[in-house]
Image: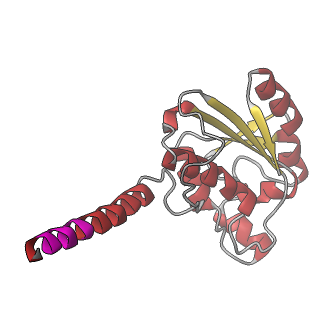
């Protein structure tokens, strides 16, 4: 009886230890580890498709409320990637564009230019670097770039320019990308 109790205790320990390890392993598998916190949803009623390709374009025009903090709308792109990879969706089954315009465009400034305007370092640069490393295409509206003096020399290298946000949004939606707008 005591041996059975010891065996049950040992098995219980193994189960608890393995669950903790699995959670730790999931957290380390996030494609963008330092941004985009998510919560695991066990057995959702509406199942996530793990096989179909996701083609998504995020349209971000709002700046961060506090320029010393990461833009939460841009961070949503990291959250999108993290939660789907954690749910078992392969990263290579998601094609993501991020289109920046309006007040959000200044988050694309190199640190020295961002600091001139906001008197603080640009906290978004590591996020943009991480997004780009995971294959996210970052487009800046060409019209906004001129209106807000965000020339190629002043913006981070992870950025590509388009004629306009409107043009890129139309073309990407024509190519089957689904719009997520902020």
Task: Identify the image quadrant of the N terminus.
Answer: bottom left
Place of residue 18 in the rendered image (x, y in percent of width and height, measured from the top left)? 29, 61
Place of residue 4 in the rendered image (x, y in percent of width and height, measured from the top left)? 13, 69
* Lateral position of residue 122 relative to residue 10, left or right: right
Of 96 and 44, the residue lying toward us:
44
Q: Looking at the rendering, which quadrant does residue 126 occupy?
A: bottom right
Would you place residue 80 above or below residue 53 in this image? below
* Lateral position of residue 72 relative to residue 84, left or right: right
Main secondary structure found in the magenta portion = helix
Of 43 and 39, the residue lying toward us:
43
Q: Indicate whether residue 148 is drawn in magenta.
A: no
What range is drawn magenta here?
4-12
Residue at 59% x, 58% y: name it. Answer: 127
Q: Indicate whether residue 10 is drawn in magenta.
A: yes
Q: Looking at the rendering, which quadrant does residue 106 occupy?
A: bottom right
Place of residue 50 in the rendered image (x, y in percent of width and height, measured from the top left)? 54, 34
Would you place residue 90 above or below residue 127 in this image? above
Residue at 52% x, 63% y: name it. Answer: 34
Residue at 84% x, 54% y: name it. Answer: 149
Place of residue 142 in the rendered image (x, y in percent of width and height, measured from the top left)? 83, 40
Would you place residue 18 above or below residue 153 in this image? below
Check the image and name the residue furthest to the top.
175
* Lateral position of residue 163 relative to residue 52, left or right: right
């Amino acid at each position: 009886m005591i041996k059975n109790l010891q065996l049950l205790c040992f098995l219980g320990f193994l189960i608890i230890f393995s669950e903790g390890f699995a959670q730790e392993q999931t957290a380390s598998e996030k494609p963008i580890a330092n941004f985009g916190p998510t919560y695991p949803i066990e057995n959702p009623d509406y199942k996530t498709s793990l096989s179909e390709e996701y083609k998504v374009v995020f349209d971000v025009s709002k700046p961060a409320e506090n320029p010393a903090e990461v833009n939460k709308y841009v961070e949503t792109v990291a959250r999108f990637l993290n939660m789907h990879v954690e749910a078992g969706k392969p990263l290579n089954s998601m094609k993501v564009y991020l289109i920046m315009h309006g007040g959000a465009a200044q988050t694309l400034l190199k640190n020295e230019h961002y600091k001139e305007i906001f008197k603080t370092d640009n906290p978004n640069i590591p996020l943009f670097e991480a997004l780009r490393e995971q294959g996210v295409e970052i487009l800046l509206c060409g019209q906004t770039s001129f209106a807000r003096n965000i020339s190629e020399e002043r913006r981070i290298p992870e950025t590509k320019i388009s004629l306009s946000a409107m043009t890129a949004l139309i073309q990407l939606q024509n190519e089957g990308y689904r719009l997520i707008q902020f």
